[in-house]
Amino acid sequence: MRRYTHERLVRRNTLLGKVLSFGGIGILVVALIVSLTRPTAIGLVLPVSLIGMVASQIGTIFLTRWNRRDRADLMIDEALKGLDGRFALFHYLLGTPHVLIGPAGAVALVPRSEVGLIEHADDRWWITRYRRGQPDGKRRELVGLEQEAESAARALERRLERAIPEHAEGRVTPVAVFLAENTRLEAEGSSPAAVHVKKLKEFVRKMPRHPGPSEADVDRMAERFPPPLAGRRPS
């Protein structure tokens, strides 16, 4: 399997997260010192403190997403390791964050981080969160999953239409991928399809075949993302 990721984007967002996080903390420290040395400058200290707090929180969000070992692209890479050369995996390069191209055509992988029991019933998604490792018995509707999957599929379709117009009729299939270790999934036959990341490789291998980009098309697309913009990772 060929794997490509937008390494420059990952490095840039990781650096931005560090700058905002530590910079925000630095601003808060400066604001504290000013408040102790110049008590009358409260009109300046409050807005500066607010800026530092917001910057630090935004930086923490960036670091949580881009600078962790359980980052979505790394977990998907690990889950699909061992697929043969018919498959190509793209991260942050084709209009939607995670794309798998293979015998099943183009697949938009939509990672989800919810923890709990995930069910699909009556054309709706439900979640029962865990308390002390067990479902708490309160089932709530899980909103936004269909919309996110549809948006990912449309974005990928538009990008493929521009990149390889001769395959514009190819089908894009969205698949929700749940990443949390303890999440349990009961969604057979759901729309969009859903799978736990641990079972993703088996799921992909069993997907029905659909027309999609060929290996030559994949090579052409990959040539548009040369290093250091995108790095190719060995399977």
Image (cartoon, grey):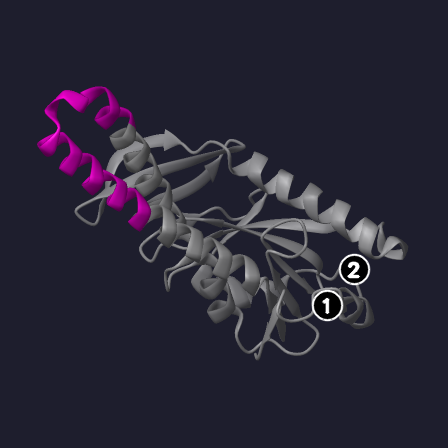
- Residue 220: percent from left, percent from top: 80, 68
As helix, strand or loop, the secondary structure at mark 2 comes to: loop
Q: Which residue is mark 2?
A: 212
Magenta residues span 22-47
Residue drawn 13% across the image and 28% down it: 38
Q: Earlier in the sequence, mark 2 or mark 1?
A: 2
Residue 169, percent across and down?
85, 50
Residue placed at 29% from the left, 50% from the top?
Answer: 22
Location of the N terminus (image quadrant): bottom right
Horizontal side of 101 relative to 5 (left or right) equals: right
- Whether residue 33 is visible here, answered yes or no, is yes
Q: Which residue appears at 58% of the width and 52% of the height? A: 97
Q: Amino acid at mark 2?
A: Gly
Mark 1: secondary structure: helix
Q: Position of residue 219 (x, y in %)?
A: 77, 71
Residue beneath disc 1: 222
Q: Is residue 96 above or below residue 35?
A: below
For this view, does 188 lie left or right of residue 151? left
User: What is the CA distance from the residue labelled 2 to the residue labelled 1?
Assistant: 16 Å
Crowding at mark 1 (Cα within 10 Å: few <14, some 14-19, many 20+)? some
Residues at circles 2 and 1 in contact by the CB criterion of under 8 Å: no
Instruction: Tell me, yes or no, if residue 170 can be seen here.
Output: no
Work out whether 15 lies above or below 153. Answer: below
Is residue 39 on the magenta stretch? yes
Q: Residue at x 67, y 45 (%)?
A: 153
Q: Is residue 135 left or right of residue 175?
A: left
Q: Crowding at label 2, few (<14), some or many (≥20) Cα neighbours within 10 Å? A: many
Q: In the picture, residue 91 is in which quadrant?
A: bottom right
